[in-house]
Amino acid sequence: MSWLEKLRDLVRKPENAVLDPDAPGLRVVVSAFDPAVADSAVLADSPGWASEAPAVLVHHLVLPADRIEEAAAILAQDGYDLREQSRDGGRVLAHARRVQVLDALHCAQERSRMAGLAQRLGGDAPGWEARQPGDSPTASA
């Protein structure tokens, strides 16, 4: 192994394990459904959240049924998978899901983005939750 390869190995960041959003054993480790509570506070108060590990970020959306495909296309541009959960008349409860490492800034930005998208489409974004495997180490707050 050359000195250049050794140097690359030293500075290379370790890759996070790939997390499957449909994996069995995922549990909700943090949720934010109160708009008056900052996402940073929600994350800080969550003893089950492993801050360095990837999580499935799930935004809950209530959208008009005739706007679901439009929402899915917009969200797919940023790596979100939109899953329909239930229908109630002309409204659909859907989950926009994406795997990422969570931090307060990005959670707040995405919450705001989802609220704006839902509003433009005539719906609502009541909140979000994050899921991690049940054997995730507990992060210190």
Image: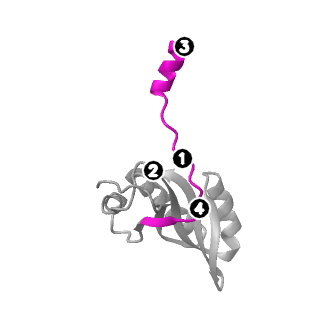
Of 118 and 135, nearer the camera is 135
* Residue corresponding to mark 3: 2
The CA span between labels 3 and 1 is: 27 Å
Q: Residue at x 52, y 15 (%)?
A: 4
Specify few, some or many for label 4: CA neighbours under 10 Å numbering under 14, 14-19, or 20 or more. Answer: few
- Which mark is first along the chain, 2 or 3? 3
**Front position among marks 3 and 2:** 3
Q: Position of residue 24 (x, y in %)?
A: 57, 65
* Residue corresponding to mark 1: 17
Disc 1, SS: loop
Instruction: Tell me where the magenta segment starts and ends, as one range.
Output: 1-29
- Which mark is first along the chain, 3 or 4? 3
* Residue corresponding to mark 2: 53
Residue type at mark 1 is Ala
Question: Please, which residue is most extreme toward the top here?
Answer: 3
Residue type at mark 3 is Ser
Disc 2, SS: loop
The CA span between labels 2 and 1 is: 8 Å
Q: Position of residue 50 (x, y in %)?
A: 40, 54
Magenta segment: does it hold 3? yes
Residue type at mark 2 is Ala
* Residue corresponding to mark 4: 23
Quadrant occupied by the C terminus:
bottom left
* Left/right of residue 80 with respect to residue 125 in the rendered view: right
Q: Position of residue 98 (x, y in %)?
A: 56, 56
- Which mark is first along the chain, 1 or 4? 1
Q: Position of residue 59 (x, y in %)?
A: 52, 65
- Which mark is first along the chain, 1 or 3? 3
Is the Cβ of the residue at disc 3 closer than 8 Å to that at disc 2? Answer: no
- Name above or below for residue 33 compared with residue 15: below
